[in-house]
Structure formats: structure tokens, C-alpha cells
Image (cartoon, rainbow, N blue to C red):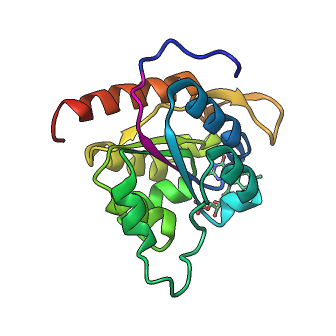
Amino acid sequence: MARRPDIPLRHGRVLIVVTGALPAAFVPSWILCLREWYGWDVRVCVTHAATRLVSADALAATSGNPVLGPDWRPATGRVDHREAAAWAEAVLVVPATANWIAKYAHGITDSLALATTAFTTAPVVVAPSLGPLAERPATLRNLRTLREDGVHVVATGSGVSAHSGTRESGAMPSVDSVLATLARVTAADAEGPR
Ligand SMILES: Cc1cc2nc3c(=O)[nH]c(=O)nc-3n(C[C@H](O)[C@H](O)[C@H](O)COP(=O)(O)O)c2cc1C
């Protein structure tokens, strides 16, 4: 991903929520690109499952900020999910699992990542990684709910499955389509209240 796409993204503070899908492993390189290409100020929040797929050290080093989660820090006197929710000018959930999408669509806030996203008033862009789950009725229902709730869900694409080695649908959308959605959403947000 050495090429900067021709997408007009304005400078800002973006919170990247990383959940436990395989493309989580690529997020550090996304972060470097966002910072270098667009000057984004990036913070990262992870789920437990995400930490199996990408290291907090890589996320902290590439974002230049401490990583939030997967758990709340104990007894700090701070309310991490409210602070992060208020800090963010945009929240990018990349990659988003079927599990995370289901919980978010149902208003479940039993992790720092879910609570932060639920509390923010910033626009939320969700980039799902679903494989065959993209076609399941429950997933389709949950994605429809999110769209109806004003969440910006990027359409999945096709990609090579780590499971079968063959091309399948339901893969995480391309960087270009995620950034194009982010550009559209943040430009609209800058023009007026949502
Ligand atoms: C190697 C690996 C890859 C995975 N990829 C996906 C995926 O692409 N999409 C998905 O919905 N779940 C995937 N999972 C399953 C999730 O990690 C699992 O459902 C987990 O509970 C999600 O937790 P979270 O939503 O809190 O991150 C994967 C698991 C592993 C071990």
C-alpha cells in the first residue's frame, strides 16, 4: 500500500477500533499511511480477540499513542470510554467482526471498544470482515440495523480466504473504499450537525 489514493481527507482525530478478524494484522500499516498521507492524529482501541491477531506494541508504535483496551484500566479515576468517545472526530472500526457488529447493532456495551463507539457522537465507519457470514440472515439484519441507525457501513469486497486459499466474497473492503467513505462522512460532518 505504497500509493496514496486520490481521496481528499481532511486532517483530524480518528479513533480506530480493531476487532478480532484476520485483517487486524494489517492495521499498523493502515495507521502509518493515514498519518503520513493525511496527517491524521490516530488513537487505537482493541478487543480481546484483536490482541490475538495484532500486537498492542505495533499499534502503539505506529499510532504514536498508548493503546486503549481491551479492558478498562483499573481505578485510574478516568472514564476511558467517555474520554476517547469525546476525543474522536471520527471512529473507524476496522476490521469489524460479525460478533462486534451484532453487539453494536443491539446496543451492547460490554467492552471498552463497544462502549466507546456507543458513546461517541462522531461519525462511525464500519469496515466488516465476514467471509461467508456476510450472507447469513443474522448478519444482514444487523448490518441493516446499523445503516438505519446512521452508521456508515462500507460494503465488503472479494478477497482470498485464509481458510480455503480461494477467492470469496465478504472480505474486508479495500483501503480505497474505506478511505473514500471516511472522506465523504468527515466532509459532511464538517459542514453541519448530524
Ligand atoms: C485467525 C482468526 C481469524 C478470524 N477472522 C474473523 C473474521 O474475519 N470475521 C469474523 O467475524 N470473525 C473472525 N474470527 C472470529 C472472531 O475472532 C471471534 O468471533 C471473536 O469472538 C470476535 O471478538 P470481537 O468481536 O470482540 O473482536 C477470527 C478468529 C481467528 C482466530
* Residue 85 in picture, x, y percent from top left: 37, 59
Residue 89 shown in magenta: no
Q: Which residue is at the front of the view, 158 or 54? A: 54
Considering every residue shown, the one lying at the far right of the view is: 165
Considering every residue shown, the one lying at the far left of the view is: 193
Residue occupying image coordinates x 16% and y 35%: 192
* Residue 136 in picture, x, y percent from top left: 52, 47
Left or right: 149 in relation to 171: left
For the record, the magenta segment spans 9-16
Considering every residue shown, the one lying at the far bottom of the view is: 75
Q: Quadrant of ligand 1?
A: bottom right
Above or below 33: residue 137: below
Residue 55 in view, yes or no: no
Residue 15 shown in magenta: yes
Residue occupying image coordinates x 53% and y 45%: 42
Residue occupying image coordinates x 64% and y 26%: 158
* Residue 185 in picture, x, y percent from top left: 33, 32
The C terminus sits in image quarter: top left
Counting the numbered discs, the total is 0
